[in-house]
Amino acid sequence: MIKNAFISFQEKKEESRGSVEFQVLSFTNKIRRLTSHLELHRKDYLSQRGLRKILGKRQRLLAYLSKKNRVRYKELINQLNIRELKTR
């Protein structure tokens, strides 16, 4: 499911690898891959640290996108099937 979304997004905007949507999509793929790795290797603390760093980067990008363009943010959240940010 995510791979198909990744491919369709990549075909749609092949030149825009620096876009916020593409970066969030690649971070989400990394997060899912690391999460499945950590289910097998619970004591891999370096991977846990890497996962927390990627989660923070994705959270900052999503906060930026929600401030700049709420419609694109909602579409991306629904497409990737991730939870919405908590507002302060």
Image (cartoon, rainbow, N blue to C red):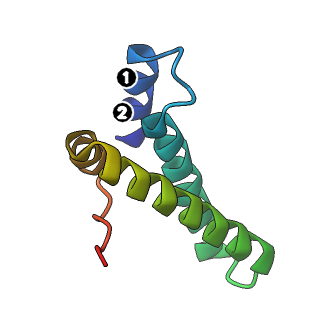
Most distant residue in the front direction? 68
Q: Quadrant of residue 38?
A: bottom right
Residue 70 lies, with reference to residue 42, above or below; the image says: above
Task: Residue 15: give x, y in percent of width and height.
Answer: 54, 14
Residue 63 visible in the picture: yes
Residue at screen point 72% across, 74% down? 49
Residue at screen point 58% across, 75% down? 39
* Number of dots carrying numbers: 2
- Residue bearing the label numbered 2: 5
The reply, left or right, for residue 52 in relation to residue 16 is right
Residue 36 visible in the picture: no
The reply, left or right, for residue 74 in relation to residue 34 is left
Locate the N terminus and report the quarter of the image it occupies: top left
- Residue bearing the label numbered 1: 8
Helix, strand, or loop for circle 2? helix
Q: Residues within 10 Å of mark 1 (few under 14, many from 20)?
A: few
Say which of 18 and 42 sits in front.
18
The reply, left or right, for residue 18 in relation to residue 13 is right
Q: CA distance from mark 2 to mark 1?
A: 5 Å
Residue at screen point 57% across, 30% down? 18
Residue at screen point 52% across, 48% down? 29
Q: Amino acid at mark 2?
A: Ala
Say which of 2 and 28 sits in front.
28
Task: Residue 44: give x, y in percent of width and height.
Answer: 76, 78
Q: Could you tell me if the residues under marks 2 and 1 are in contact, i.e. CB atoms within 8 Å?
A: yes
Most distant residue in the right direction? 46
Q: Amino acid at mark 1?
A: Ser
Helix, strand, or loop for circle 1? helix
Say which of 88 and 61 sits in front.
88
